[in-house]
């Protein structure tokens, strides 16, 4: 693996020193549509940063500007201490897995990897080694010689991700890498992203699945209508907007005299909200309250989104 | 440069895996070249009758068939003699030559035996020109008995119908190429209909028909004894023709070139649609390199089509006058159609719209440029109109090098125009292309 220091040819850069990505007041319109309406954020080296938002929130447009695929109308981007994403030096350190599968259907898995590897300047033994690595990463080693148009959706997704990594990028942009994938392949992709995270790569991950953001991301930016509503770690977002946990249960029998039940009791059903649900349940148990069934609904990003926008994430 | 080359190789690989695209680039031009060439019949050939002796020692169905074909060629009168009598007649100068069909001739004929039939040829040494001609007639007759089945439009129609079935039954024929397929089968139908019509009218007039492919396995140049026609007149041009493929092959090549231009233009939109263009745009390569990669791929494809067709034509009997000028024509044509390809790629946003527009453009260029009616047969007013079509200048450049016997100076007009057209379209196309990606 190379460090950004080598790539950018700048001295004095230390991990943790400066943000890997710094975005300021980024804007982009398509005709009358304001796709990105002034977003600012920064991503630390080694961090997995989530962009969470519903369809049309502007996530892909943001990624397209960050990777230099389209030019912003306004605002600034600094990447990996190299500068703007239009610079070839910057492009070499970033890898992109676009939301739409971006592969040559008539080429084989290995040919796709080889071709894009060459586009990043890889040649000879190094190229061969990286292609092998990427095939193994995508678990497609045994299908290396098959054309992409014979692959399943999940296999294509994995290859789409592997192509983004063939040149060992330091910063990786993954735009909905699990779209249209069955649960098993999805798990496989999660494990791969966790592997990248373990290697210290910086990952920007867009999704409208809050479970994904919750599992993979260190920090999440909640996006809607081209704007970022808030950015924070997941526990912090939950604490700020998630509200309290909801506990629902069926009691075995009526409570003993003297035990005061929280919340609403309807026959043998109990429902209450709590900041610290597990502790409260333990206290009730200790006091002799026996539950037949028990359910704790913790606040999640869905609730955060609902409270931030008044709408549900997927409608 | 290596990046550009890598991209071009990728595009060539992609197009070579697209069976339909390959058919338009190679299969269709070959068919056009053969069919039209066959329809021109014996253009440029002078009628001479040679009297020869035939010694049929094999006396098999095949040898009798061969003699029949020989007579049917219309250029020889045959006297059946035994070996001694035949040799004697040639020696005394009464006959031009003798043709011997030794024992075992029958077993070695036919398309499938893999052996060349053994034929003896004896010629009066003082009559070299006629001997050479006889040689040609024999090869032609052999070819005829090999490819005879293609002589009958009904048989060819069977092949065309089968081809049509193959093409339309293929499950996922991309919508983008639908118009081209329709166009192709329609033009094949027209071609066959014309052919059948010609046979019918020949029959009515009681003429021996010369429609249909006569495969010339070799063609011997004949001495031009015709009177000198006025320079530039049609008769003068005909006198320059040395093979019936001279007219059909330049024309046919242009169909392959047009298919290359449309094919690569479609790959540009396809790259955009399938997202691979996005990957290229975020890679550390410039937009100029991306366009250059496409251009190089198309350039190589056009040159390859022309080279392949030249080889096939030469094998059939075409004798290009100047290989260097053929190369000059090929390069100019490639430059022109690379430019047109880039411009075609920006006329629409979807594969369907680009394919539709590109093929409409192709048909217009072909129709007015001599891709359908050969320039040499065009009425004057149409010839004037045709100057607007790059296909005309391409065919003129090719013909100039193959048989019109152009000097380098005469080549400069068509070639210069082609390069200029290419540069202008390339500039327009790449400016629009780079704007539309942002
Ligand atoms: N090339 C384009 N031309 C016109 N409008 C566009 C273009 N790209 C995006 N938009 C518009 O910009 C807005 C943001 O789109 P974007 O693709 O960034 O959303 P997203 O958050 O990625 O959505 P999704 O979750 O559906 O992928 C949408 O209203 C979309 O219609
Ligand atoms: Mg998107």
Image: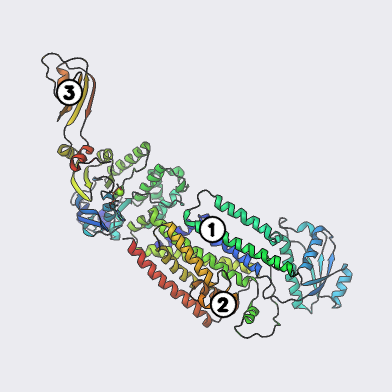
Spot the residue most to the left. Answer: A258
Label 3 belongs to which residue? A281
Contact, mark 3 vs mark 1 (Cβ under 8 Å) = no
Question: At numbered mark 2, what does the secondary structure look like: helix, strand or loop?
Answer: helix
Q: Residue A170's spot in the image, x, y percent? A: 28, 51
Q: Residues within 10 Å of mark 1 (few under 14, many from 20)?
A: few
Question: At numbered mark 3, what does the secondary structure look like: helix, strand or loop?
Answer: helix
Label 1 belongs to which residue? B182
Q: Residue B219's spot in the image, x, y percent? A: 69, 71
Q: Nearer the viewer, residue B270 or A97?
A: B270
Identify the residue at horizontal 40%, vertical 49% (top origin): A131
Q: Nearer the viewer, residue A153 or A310?
A: A310
Q: Residues within 10 Å of mark 2 (few under 14, many from 20)?
A: many
Give residue B400's mark: 2
Question: At numbered mark 1, what does the secondary structure look like: helix, strand or loop?
Answer: helix
Q: Numbered disc 2: what chain?
A: B
Choose the circle earlier in sequence order: 1 or 2: 1
Contact, mark 2 vs mark 3 (Cβ under 8 Å) = no
Q: From where the camera sits, is residue A43 visible? A: no
Q: From where the camera sits, is residue B313 visible? A: yes
């Amino acid at each position: 693996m190379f460090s950004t220091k080598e790539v950018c040819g700048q001295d004095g850069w230390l991990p943790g020193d400066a943000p890997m990505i710094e975005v300021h007041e980024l804007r982009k319109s398509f005709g009358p549509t304001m796709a990105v309406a002034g977003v600012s954020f920064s991503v630390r080296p080694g961090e997995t940063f989530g962009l969470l938002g519903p369809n049309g929130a502007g996530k892909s447009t943001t990624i397209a500007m960050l990777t230099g695929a389209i030019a912003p109308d306004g605002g600034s981007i600094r990447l990996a201490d190299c500068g703007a994403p239009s610079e070839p030096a910057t492009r070499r350190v970033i890898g992109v897995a676009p939301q739409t599968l971006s592969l040559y259907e008539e080429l084989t898995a290995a040919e796709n990897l080889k071709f894009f590897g060459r586009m990043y300047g890889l040649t000879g033994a190094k190229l061969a080694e990286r292609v092998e690595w990427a095939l193994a990463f995508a678990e497609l080693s045994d299908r290396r010689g098959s054309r992409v148009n014979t692959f399943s959706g999940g296999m294509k997704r994995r290859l789409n991700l592997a192509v983004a990594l063939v040149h060992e990028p330091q910063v990786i942009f993954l735009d909905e890498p699990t779209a249209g994938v069955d649960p098993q392949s999805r798990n496989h992709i999660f494990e791969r992203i966790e592997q990248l995270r373990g290697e210290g790569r910086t990952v920007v991950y867009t999704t409208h699945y809050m479970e994904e953001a919750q599992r993979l991301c260190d920090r999440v930016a909640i996006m809607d209508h081209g704007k970022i509503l808030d950015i924070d770690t997941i526990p912090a977002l939950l604490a700020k907007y998630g509200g309290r946990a909801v506990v629902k249960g069926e009691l075995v029998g009526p409570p003993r005299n003297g035990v005061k039940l929280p919340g609403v009791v309807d026959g043998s059903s109990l429902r209450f909200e709590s900041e610290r649900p597990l502790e409260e349940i333990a206290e009730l148990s200790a006091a002799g309250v026996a539950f037949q069934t028990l359910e704790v609904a913790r606040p999640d990003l869905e609730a955060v989104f609902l409270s931030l926008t008044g709408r549900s994430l997927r409608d | 440069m290596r990046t550009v080359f890598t991209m071009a190789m990728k595009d060539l690989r992609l197009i070579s895996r697209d069976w339909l695209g390959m058919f338009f680039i190679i299969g269709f031009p070959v068919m056009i070249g053969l069919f039209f060439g066959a329809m021109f019949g014996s253009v440029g050939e002078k009628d001479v009758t040679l009297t020869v002796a035939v010694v049929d020692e094999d006396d098999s169905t095949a040898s009798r068939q061969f003699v029949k074909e020989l007579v049917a060629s219309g250029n020889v009168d045959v006297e059946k003699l035994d070996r001694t009598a035949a040799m004697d007649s040639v020696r005394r100068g009464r006959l031009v030559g003798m043709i011997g069909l030794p024992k075992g001739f029958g077993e070695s004929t036919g398309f499938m035996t893999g052996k060349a039939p053994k034929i003896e040829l004896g010629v009066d040494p003082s009559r070299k020109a006629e001997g050479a001609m006889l040689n040609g007639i024999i090869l032609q007759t052999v070819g005829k008995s090999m490819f005879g089945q293609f002589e009958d439009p009904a048989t060819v129609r069977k092949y065309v119908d089968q081809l049509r079935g193959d093409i339309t039954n293929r499950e996922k024929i991309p919508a983008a190429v639908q118009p081209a397929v329709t166009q192709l089968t329609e033009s094949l139908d027209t071609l066959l209909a014309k052919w059948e019509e010609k046979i019918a009218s020949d029959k009515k007039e009681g003429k021996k028909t010369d429609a249909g492919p006569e495969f010339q396995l070799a063609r011997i140049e004949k001495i031009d004894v015709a009177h000198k026609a006025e320079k530039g007149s049609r008769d003068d041009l005909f006198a320059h023709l040395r093979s019936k493929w001279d007219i059909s092959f330049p024309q046919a090549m242009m169909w392959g070139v047009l298919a290359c231009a449309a094919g690569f233009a479609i790959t540009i939109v396809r790259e955009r649609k399938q997202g691979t263009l996005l990957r290229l745009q975020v890679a550390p390569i410039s937009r100029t390199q991306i366009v250059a990669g496409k251009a190089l791929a198309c350039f190589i494809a056009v040159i390859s089509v022309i080279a392949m067709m030249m080889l096939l034509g030469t094998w059939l009997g075409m004798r290009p006058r100047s290989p260097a000028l053929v190369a000059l024509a090929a390069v100019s044509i490639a430059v022109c159609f690379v430019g047109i390809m880039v411009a075609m790629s920006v006329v629409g946003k979807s594969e369907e719209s680009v394919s539709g527009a590109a093929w409409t453009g192709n048909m217009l260029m072909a129709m007015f440029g001599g891709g359908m009616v050969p320039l040499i047969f065009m009425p004057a007013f149409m010839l004037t109109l045709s100057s607007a079509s790059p296909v005309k200048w391409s065919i003129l450049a090719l013909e100039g090098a193959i048989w019109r016997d152009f000097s380098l100076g005469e080549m400069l007009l068509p070639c210069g125009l082609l390069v200029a057209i290419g540069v202008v379209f390339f500039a327009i196309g790449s400016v629009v292309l780079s704007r539309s990606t942002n």
